[in-house]
């Protein structure tokens, strides 16, 4: 496999990563949502009653911190540009660097705004209390997401309207694609 262009999207839960991924898809870029790939494995291999976050930790303990990235890489076809939505740690970035030139985009939103979004989103595995969301944030940070955010090539601030965020994202994508 020759080197491809990789866009690694990171950010805390509810920051707007999915909105950026949607824009990339609209541009014809293949987007692999890392949590979806993890969920596929979870539904096949999780222990009874195991939370997705605990399963993710266990997979990383068993197969290394880059394990989810390795699963995602298997989903690449012949694309020249691929985006990975939901990078959680630096080891995943290292896995992506083995197959391509990586550009990291971090999406940032203030916690209060993210919590409001997550409570509205209502995804099955989303926690529905502010305390639960704060706990999830700390679990994400323990996983290493803060390092990826801190070392991102670009940071998109998502603290206003969806239209404003899309406008900022479009400007950035024009520069890097």
Image (spheres, grey):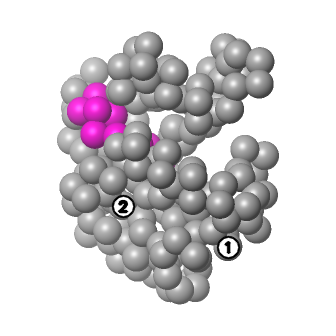
Q: Is residue 109 above or below residue 23?
A: below
Q: Is residue 70 above or below residue 11?
A: above
What element does badge 2 sit on? strand
Q: Which residue is mark 1?
A: 116
- Judging by the rendered image, the residue that carries numbered circle 2 is 106
Secondary-structure class at tag 1: helix
Identify the image quadrant of the C terminus: bottom left
Q: Up-down: is 64 above or below 133?
A: above
- Please state the extent of the stretch shown in magenta in the rendering: 84-95
Question: Is the Cβ of the residue at disc 2 closer than 8 Å to that at disc 1?
Answer: no
Q: Where on the picture, by quarter, is residue 100?
A: top left
Which disc is residue 108 wearing? none
Asked whether 88 falls inside the magenta stretch, the response is: yes
Say which residue appears at 59% left-offset and 26% top-offset.
55
Residue at 76% x, 58% y is 128
Position of residue 39 relative to residue 43, above or below, is below
Q: In the picture, residue 118 is in which quadrant?
A: bottom right
- Label 1 Cα crowd, 10 Å radius (few <14 / some 14-19 / many 20+): few
Q: Is residue 23 left or right of residue 39?
A: left
Q: CA distance from mark 2 to mark 1?
A: 19 Å
Q: Position of residue 66 (x, y in %)?
A: 35, 27
* Residue 160 lies in the magenta stretch: no
Q: Position of residue 159 (x, y in %)?
A: 49, 81
Mark 2 nearby-residue class (10 Å; few <14, some 14–19, many ≥20): many
Q: Is residue 51 left or right of residue 175?
A: right
Q: Position of residue 148 (x, y in %)?
A: 30, 50
Q: Quadrant of the N terminus?
A: top left
First-in-chain label (2 vs 1): 2
Q: Is 130 on the left or on the right of 171, as rendered?
A: right
Q: Which of pointers 2 and 1 indicates the residue nearer the eye?
A: 1
């Amino acid at each position: 496999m020759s080197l491809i262009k990789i866009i690694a999207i990171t950010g805390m839960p509810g920051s707007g990563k999915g909105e950026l991924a949607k824009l990339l898809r609209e541009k014809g870029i293949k987007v692999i949502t890392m949590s979806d790939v993890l969920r596929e494995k979870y539904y096949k291999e999780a222990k009874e009653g195991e939370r997705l976050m605990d399963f993710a930790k266990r997979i990383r303990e068993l197969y290394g911190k880059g394990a989810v990235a390795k699963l995602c890489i298997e989903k690449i076809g012949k694309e020249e540009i691929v985006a990975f939505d939901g990078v959680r740690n630096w080891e995943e970035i290292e896995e992506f660097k083995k197959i391509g030139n990586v550009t990291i985009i971090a999406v940032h939103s203030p916690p209060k705004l993210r919590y409001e979004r997550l409570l509205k989103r209502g995804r099955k595995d989303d926690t529905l209390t502010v305390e639960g969301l704060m706990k999830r944030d700390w679990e994400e940070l323990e996983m290493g997401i803060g390092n990826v955010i801190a070392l991102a090539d670009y940071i998109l601030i998502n603290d206003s309207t969806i239209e404003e965020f899309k406008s900022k994202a479009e400007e950035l994508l024009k520069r890097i694609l």
